Amino acid sequence: MSCDTTGAGDSFIGAFLYCLLNDEVEDLESVSDDTLRNYLDFANANAANTTTKEGALAAMFNMRMRP
């Protein structure tokens, strides 16, 4: 259930960029459709999680939350 959408977009972009940087992607066109889908699923899950908490910073993903 969503309670505050503040920071959801930032969280999505941050998580997506995290995936690109973590995999050292230099050319987005070289990423397979399956990998891109995984990146987007990860980013979407992080953005959705952000909406379940009040405020922007307190709801942001951190490495301790990574599965």
Image (cartoon, rainbow, N blue to C red):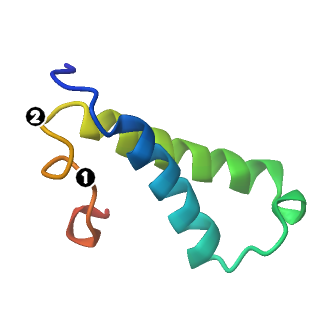
Q: Is residue 49 left or right of residue 39?
A: left
Which of the 4 image quadrants contains residue 63?
Answer: bottom left
Which of the 4 image quadrants contains residue 17?
Answer: bottom right
The C terminus, quarter of image: bottom left
Q: Is residue 29 left or right of residue 22?
A: right
Report helix, strand or loop for mark 2: loop
Q: Earlier in the sequence, mark 1 or mark 2?
A: 2
Q: Label 2 neighbourhood size at 10 Å, few (<14), some (14-19), many (20+)?
A: some
Q: CA distance from mark 1 to mark 2?
A: 10 Å
Mark 2 — residue?
54
What amino acid is found at the position of numbered circle 2 in the picture?
Glu
Residue 26 rendering spot, x and y as whole percentages: 79, 75
User: Between residues 41 and 52, which one lies in front from this camera angle?
Assistant: 52
Residue found at x 21% / y 43%: 56
Q: Label 1 neighbourhood size at 10 Å, few (<14), some (14-19), many (20+)?
A: many
When the figure is inspected, residue 66 is found, relative to residue 24, above or below; the finding is above
Report helix, strand or loop for mark 1: loop
Residue 64 rendering spot, x and y as whole percentages: 21, 70
When the figure is inspected, residue 26 is found, relative to residue 19, above or below; the finding is below
Residue with the most extreme right position: 29
Q: Is residue 17 left or right of residue 62?
A: right
Residue found at x 67% / y 45%: 37
What amino acid is found at the position of numbered circle 1 in the picture?
Met
The N terminus, quarter of image: top left
Residue 61 rendering spot, x and y as whole percentages: 28, 57
Mark 1 — residue?
60
When the figure is inspected, residue 32 is found, relative to residue 24, above or below; the finding is above
Residue found at x 10% / y 34%: 54
